[in-house]
């Protein structure tokens, strides 16, 4: 084992009330691609941050190239040859591609940075990666996929001994993925240790040598990739069989009326031509890659994104001039993707968070009626099993799962027609997930239409009665009932992408 | 990151000394200051003296109430002092010598202030200008307009009733303290009990989420600037009555003092957290300290040093608490 | 031409430069038409004298704002340093060689202390520098309430010395701006200021010591304040605790007018230089045409609004 590039032993990371890493052992050998698997919130990101020096563990030891180390800053880890490509890109949008690629390795002559050398080196890194991106362009002028490639190119500069990639393929496709894998294989043959995080099990089977699976902050398995079947990986990640996780779907297609009908919707660059519908009492999944325009569709329906063209009808009535207030009054709820940035008021009590979209119901003559507010909140908290001593606890003090349940408490109160859920289980543990899935099904059973947006294909497959697949701003297909499977969804998403690439000039017409 | 559903909820029994100190720290601090002041100079604690001290602080209190509204929505108003002086100049523009002009003066002051607040709020919300710059620009513009009008010279044509506002008493209680109490109570109810007040906290706590919960975000923010300006305008009239003549620098320093008092009262510059009455407690602490410096026989400049230390210390103190 | 317009749309900073530069040229032409004494060497050297103090303080402010902070202590610091210099030189007129570096060291240390408090206490820069400004101002006033002290003639001569028709101090100022620009654009520590201002967390993950950068930026602001104070003391011959009071907020105008955004990470010293030039020339011109100096304030406020509110960009300015 002493031949490892990095070896972590009994690493523990603790925050108040949470333990993202619990006695983790992990090692990467030189010339190995080691996949790191686990559900959202299993502790992968924290483990990566510990290796990269961005987070200091509470206990445990790190041995790097045979020496015991404890990073005090990301800088130390980088200088020692560890390069991390974080999922949330660490780029500077106002600055040039070249400067971003050489951010901590600016070439100097006589102490001054040489602009020419900078561009030459950056161009060389991009060329090695196999992409052509102008080095003078500012990063915020690039499409997301190119930004990801810039982030990857950073790893090709300097002496990297350990390369860590956190879901690099979330926003790139086809050829770019091939280029990335080519480069990873080359680096592997040069003896670089690589940690690779991805949700796509096919990719792991294709590229990785060994795999470590994390669950709830603990290592549940480390083994050669070939020794584990796909099903075995899933079972280890989830910790139980899938049938137990998801409630049963509708027996037959819903025969109810549409609550939501969207026709030829165009809104911003990411939503180009979208038509679909949601019936009362059914859960409709909206699947597709990150950046395919799913969230933007939800925003357009809820009135926070300008609609350029097309129509949105609620219960058959066309809905023009939408704003969140009007949507809420209609009985529409929108549980946003990022609960801390767009969902919760962390500094306010649970009660205020629950009544937020509907202050009118607790207002008497312009003043908030505290008793009614508290009562309402307690009722909701009980119904959704929010674990907190009182309704006056600040939401920022709750765990991720409980925070998410507060959001369900909020929106289920006012959403009596349609509930839009964008990544409803991001960052919550499996126990809370199962509870949330039951809640979603219960809400649908009570006659509400549910639009479920999720990057976790499993979740979409497990929960949805019907699935629409989105790709590059368009709906590329619809799948019903028993035909819903991860393969069918991926097939639609990827195929449409290849096709649109062939017929860009003609303005691709795709099925919907 | 992840959290177990069964994770321990915040420990309520842990509302220990630290929590009490955090909640009532300012009151305790004020009490200590008062005791120290009384020990140094026994007459200090006599009601007459205390009322006097508070009377001087009343206009600042009015500004602080307004400043609290703006800070709560992640803003800042640097134009309050300049507005106070401008309103004072405006009051003299009526060249009135009779008391019947006073209602008119008040209406004009309030309308003028509201317009100023409207502009600041518009710049901040619709033009996405940082509150610092928007109100800084308003401050400079008001200053220029005011000086251009007065030619830089002080004026003293004022209805005699104006001084009643500053030093008059009703049933032995100073008029300006009564006004401050009414203003603070009314706006305190608006902020802490009304639907609009809740919307202010929502916008301050998380502007994006507020919008998604149907709160008309821009309107709420603009209204906060308008309220702040009106408070400053009224404060300006009361200060004017106190000073008697209109210098072009009436209220100078109040922009910073009002921010210091609010921060000391636990109003967070990051928005969404604060309380009008605690902010007023901040004013009380500020004026008692200023008095204490004099009682101790220190030079008056010492006030500046202590104020500086206190604002940094108070911000660091509140910074340590979570949510 | 179309290419240029496209370029300006994309590069907002360049657009700011062009707009401010054009406004400056318009002012110069208008000045020449309105008064025959405006376009003279005498007036220009006068104008340069006027812009040195604002230029130095704004330069320091630029570093801080680029890094994502703000320095509200500079005005008080400039006042304190003039008092220090004039008092020290009154006591030992022969020790000019010591007084100048000493004032620079003190100013840099106080600036660094600002940065240190921001980093250690994690308190908003606005509060820390506001508090420090108050402390410095109070301490200075306790030492010297009214302007006083004196400086040796040799020192005073420096402020008024010319090479040909150009004041030496102006040449020094331009040289300092050029060096500052070179440093920001072409050294690693200079680029670190942009990284830290653009996105502190990304900078940290990319191996930038953000805390060091913060302290560095405030230290530079202190150093620049020393430069302004040295020139001021030489020119006025006295130390005046209140002389810098208005400078704090004045120093921010040229920075934002020059296209540097308060959120940090975008801008540069060239913009600040143009901003200082614009503001100073405007005041100078208004004096020439006998517009009450009070309107200068109105115009300055309007310039801030126009420069910031109508320079469209997604980021908060």
Image (spheres, rainbow, N blue to C red):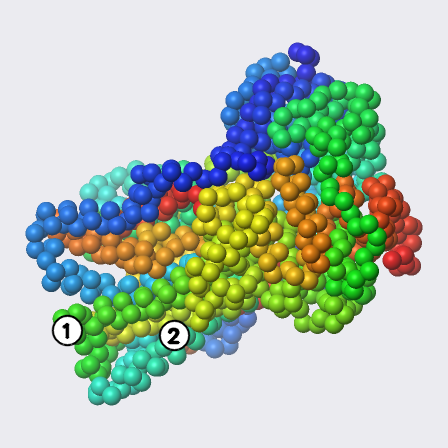
For mark 1, does the 10 Å Cα neighbourhood hold few (<14), some (14 to 19), or many (20 or more) residues? Answer: few
- What is the number of the mark on residue B171? 1
Q: Residue under mark 2: which chain is it in? A: B
**Outermost residue to the left:** B42
Residue C316 shows in this picture: no
Q: Quadrant of the N terminus of chain B?
A: top right
Measured as percent of width and height from the top left, residue A346 is found at: 50, 49
Name the element at disc 2: helix
Q: Is residue B298 left or right of residue A211?
A: left
Residue at 75%, 60% (x, y): give it. A280
Give the mark toward the camera: 1 or 2: 1
For mark 2, does the 10 Å Cα neighbourhood hold few (<14), some (14 to 19), or many (20 or more) residues? Answer: many
Task: Give the CA distance from mark 1 to mark 2.
Answer: 31 Å
Which quadrant of the structure image shows residue B197?
Answer: bottom left
Q: Find disc 2 in the rendering and name its residue.
A: B113
Label located before the other in sequence (1 or 2): 2
The residue nearer to you, when weighing A498 against A440, is A440
Residue at 65%, 61% (x, y): give it. A416
Measured as percent of width and height from the top left, residue C200 is found at: 54, 42
- What is the number of the mark on residue B139? none
Residue at 42%, 53% (x, y): give it. B273
């Amino acid at each position: 084992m002493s031949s490892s590039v990095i070896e972590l032993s009994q690493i523990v990371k603790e925050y108040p009330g949470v333990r993202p890493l619990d006695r983790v052992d992990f090692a990467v050998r030189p010339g190995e691609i080691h996949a790191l698997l686990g559900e959202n919130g299993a502790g992968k990101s924290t483990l990566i941050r510990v290796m990269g020096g961005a987070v200091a563990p509470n206990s445990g030891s790190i041995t790097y190239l045979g020496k015991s180390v404890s990073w005090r800053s990301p800088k130390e880890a980088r200088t020692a040859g560890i390069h991390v490509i974080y999922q949330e890109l660490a780029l500077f949008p106002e600055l040039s591609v070249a400067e971003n690629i050489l951010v901590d390795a600016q070439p100097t002559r006589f102490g001054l940075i040489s602009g020419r050398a900078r561009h030459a080196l950056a161009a060389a890194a991009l060329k090695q990666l196999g992409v052509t991106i102008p080095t003078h362009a500012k990063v915020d002028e690039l499409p997301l996929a190119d930004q990801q490639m810039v982030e990857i190119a950073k790893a090709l500069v300097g002496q990297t001994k350990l390369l860590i990639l956190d879901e690099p393929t979330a926003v790139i496709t086809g050829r770019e993925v091939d280029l990335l894998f080519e480069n990873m294989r080359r680096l592997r043959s040069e003896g670089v240790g690589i940690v690779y995080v991805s949700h796509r099990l096919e990719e792991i089977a294709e590229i990785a040598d060994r795999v470590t699976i994390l669950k709830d902050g603990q290592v549940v398995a480390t083994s050669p990739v070939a020794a584990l079947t796909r099903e075995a990986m899933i079972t280890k990640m989830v910790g139980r069989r899938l049938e137990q996780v998801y409630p049963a779907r509708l027996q037959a297609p819903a025969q109810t009326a549409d609550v939501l009908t969207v026709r030829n919707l165009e809104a911003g660059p990411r939503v180009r031509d979208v038509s679909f519908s949601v019936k009362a009492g059914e859960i409709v999944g909206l699947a597709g890659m990150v950046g395919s325009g799913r969230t933007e569709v939800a925003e357009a329906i809820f009135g926070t994104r300008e609609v350029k063209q097309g129509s949105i009808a609620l219960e058959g009535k066309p809905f023009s001039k939408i704003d969140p207030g009007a949507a809420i009054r209609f009985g529409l709820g929108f549980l946003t993707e990022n609960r801390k940035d767009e969902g919760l008021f962390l500094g306010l009590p649970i009660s205020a968070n629950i009544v937020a979209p509907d202050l009118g119901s607790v207002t008497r003559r312009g003043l908030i009626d505290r008793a009614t507010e508290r009562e309402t909140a307690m009722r909701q908290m009980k119904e959704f099993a929010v674990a907190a001593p009182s309704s006056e606890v600040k939401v920022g003090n709750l765990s991720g799962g409980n925070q998410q349940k507060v959001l369900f408490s909020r929106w289920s109160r006012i959403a009596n027609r349609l509930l839009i859920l964008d990544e409803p289980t991001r960052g919550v543990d499996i126990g809370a997930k199962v509870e949330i899935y039951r809640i979603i099904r219960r809400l649908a059973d009570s006659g509400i239409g549910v639009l479920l947006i999720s990057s976790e294909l499993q979740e979409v497959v497990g929960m949805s009665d019907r699935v629409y697949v989105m790709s590059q701003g368009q709906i590329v297909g619809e799948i019903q009932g028993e035909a819903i499977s991860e393969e069918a969804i991926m097939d639609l998403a990827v195929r449409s992408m290849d096709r649109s690439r062939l017929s860009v000039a003609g303005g691709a017409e795709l099925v919907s | 990151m992840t959290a177990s559903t069964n994770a321990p909820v915040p420990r309520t029994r842990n509302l220990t000394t630290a929590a009490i100190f955090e909640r009532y720290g300012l009151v305790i601090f004020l009490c200590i200051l008062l005791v120290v002041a009384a020990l140094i100079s026994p007459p200090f604690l006599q009601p007459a003296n205390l009322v006097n001290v508070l009377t001087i602080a009343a206009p600042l209190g009015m500004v602080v109430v307004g400043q609290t509204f703006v800070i709560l929505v992640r803003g800042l108003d640097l134009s309050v002092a300049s507005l106070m002086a401008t309103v004072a100049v405006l009051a003299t523009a009526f060249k009135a010598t009779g008391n019947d002009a006073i209602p008119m003066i008040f209406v004009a002051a309030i309308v003028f202030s509201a317009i100023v607040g409207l502009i600041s709020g518009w710049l901040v919300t619709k033009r996405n200008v940082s509150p610092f710059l928007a109100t800084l620009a308003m401050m400079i513009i008001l200053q220029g307009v005011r000086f251009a009008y007065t030619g830089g010279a002080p004026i003293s044509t004022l209805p005699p009733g104006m001084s009643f506002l500053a030093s008059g008493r009703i049933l032995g209680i100073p008029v300006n303290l009564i006004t401050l109490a009414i203003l603070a109570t009314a706006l305190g109810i608006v902020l802490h009990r009304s639907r609009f007040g809740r919307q202010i906290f929502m916008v301050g706590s998380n502007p994006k989420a507020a919008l998604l919960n149907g709160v008309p975000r821009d309107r709420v923010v603009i209204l906060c600037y308008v309220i702040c300006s009106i408070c400053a305008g009224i404060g300006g009239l009361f200060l004017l009555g106190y000073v008697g003549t209109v210098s072009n620098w009436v209220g100078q320093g109040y922009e910073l003092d009002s921010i210091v008092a609010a921060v000391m009262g636990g109003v967070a510059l990051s928005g969404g957290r604060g309380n009008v009455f605690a902010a007023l407690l901040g004013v009380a602490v500020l004026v008692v300290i200023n008095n204490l410096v004099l009682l101790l026989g220190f030079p008056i400049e010492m006030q500046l040093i202590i104020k500086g230390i206190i604002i940094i210390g108070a911000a660091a103190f509140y910074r340590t608490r979570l949510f | 031409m179309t290419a240029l317009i496209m370029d300006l749309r994309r590069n907002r900073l360049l657009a700011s430069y062009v707009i401010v530069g054009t406004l400056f040229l318009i002012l110069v032409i208008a000045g020449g038409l309105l008064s025959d004494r405006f376009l003279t060497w005498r007036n220009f050297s006068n104008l340069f004298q006027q812009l040195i103090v604002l230029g130095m303080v704004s330069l320091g402010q630029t570093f801080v704002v680029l890094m994502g902070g703000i320095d509200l202590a500079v005005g008080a610091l400039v006042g304190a340093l003039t008092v220090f210099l004039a008092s020290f030189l009154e006591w030992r007129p022969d020790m000019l060689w010591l007084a100048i570096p000493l004032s620079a060291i003190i100013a840099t240390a106080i600036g660094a202390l600002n940065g240190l408090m921001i980093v250690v206490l994690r308190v908003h820069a606005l509060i820390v520098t506001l508090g420090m400004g108050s402390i410095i101002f109070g301490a200075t006033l306790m030492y010297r309430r009214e302007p006083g002290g004196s400086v040796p003639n040799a020192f005073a001569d420096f402020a008024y010395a010319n090479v040909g028709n150009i004041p030496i101090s102006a040449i020094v100022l331009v040289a300092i701006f050029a060096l500052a620009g070179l440093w920001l654009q072409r050294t690693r520590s200079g680029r670190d200021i942009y990284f830290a201002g653009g996105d502190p967390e990304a900078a940290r993950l990319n191996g930038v010591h953000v805390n060091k950068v913060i302290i560095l930026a405030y230290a530079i602001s202190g150093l620049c304040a020393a430069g302004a104070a040295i020139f001021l003391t030489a020119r006025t011959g006295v130390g005046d605790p209140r002389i810098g009071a208005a400078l704090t907020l004045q120093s921010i105008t040229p920075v934002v007018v020059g296209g540097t955004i308060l959120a940090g990470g975008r801008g540069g010293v060239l913009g600040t230089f143009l901003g200082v030039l614009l503001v100073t020339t405007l005041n100078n011109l208004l004096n020439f045409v006998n517009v009450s100096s009070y309107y200068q304030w109105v115009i300055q406020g309007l310039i801030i609004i126009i420069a910031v509110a109508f320079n469209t960009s997604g980021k908060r300015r």
